[in-house]
Amino acid sequence: MARSPAFPLVAILAALWLGMLLLGGPASDADAILRHAFRVPALVPAARLLTRLGDWNLLLPLTLAAAAALAWFVSRRSALIYVGLILGGRLLVEAEKVAIGRARPDENGRLVHVATLSYPSAHAAYSMIAWLGLALLAARAPRTRARAVAFALALAFLVGASRLVLAVHWPSDVIGGWAFGAGWTLLLLRLTEERRRRSGIDRSKESDR
């Protein structure tokens, strides 16, 4: 298992998540400078639309629809993994927010209403988990999978960036959300794949006896 390239990447993403936690937030000069760079009024209408692709109220029905499609076109196992990926990610993100307790930017500058804590960005994390997870589970051919993953990453990046345009997150919140979402997705999918492979080997050994 340790030889899989997914695990070093997960470790890098975990280090990035930790770095954004320790170095970002209200006291970070870098966060303050980068936050002002995203204040572009012309982008606000697009940001209001894009941010919905990370809303839990929209992602939940989309997750159920995607799971049904996976069960029909790929396998029931893939559908169950996808639902577990989404629900597990949701619980972990909310637990992180409560445990870390980072305050959001000044509410006077926010362009949409938010009521939860800041780190990590749930929109960045949810969109990364939902779209990257779907791309990896649905696409089988290498070229198709590469395109699907590229599209999923671009979509997740746009959703995360929309939270900065709407002034409801520190940049480190969004980067931390992306890092957690990608790391959680890669880790869970790799672990389930390793379990499936080992189960296949065990069944093969039993049949040889």
Image (spheres, helix red, strand yellow):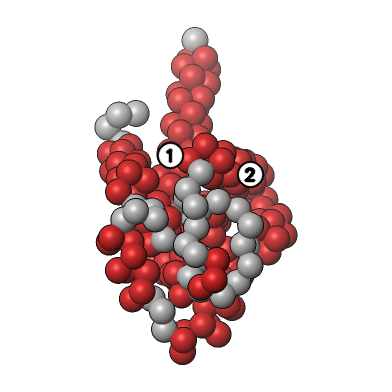
Q: Residue at x 51, y 73 (%)?
A: 109
Q: Nearer the viewer, residue 83 or 118?
A: 118
The N terminus appears in which quarter of the rendering?
top left
Q: Residue at x 30, y 29 (%)?
A: 2
Q: Residue furthest top?
A: 209
Residue 113, picture quadrant: bottom right
Disc assigned to residue 187: 1
Q: Is residue 58 left or right of residue 182?
A: right
Disc assigned to residue 87: 2
3D distance between C-alphas at marks 1 and 2: 15 Å
SS under mark 1: helix
Relative to 184, does residue 200 appear above or below in the rendering? Answer: above
Q: Residue at x 30, y 68 (%)?
A: 33
Disc assigned to residue 28: none
Q: Residue at x 55, y 51 (%)?
A: 117
Residue 63, picture quadrant: bottom right
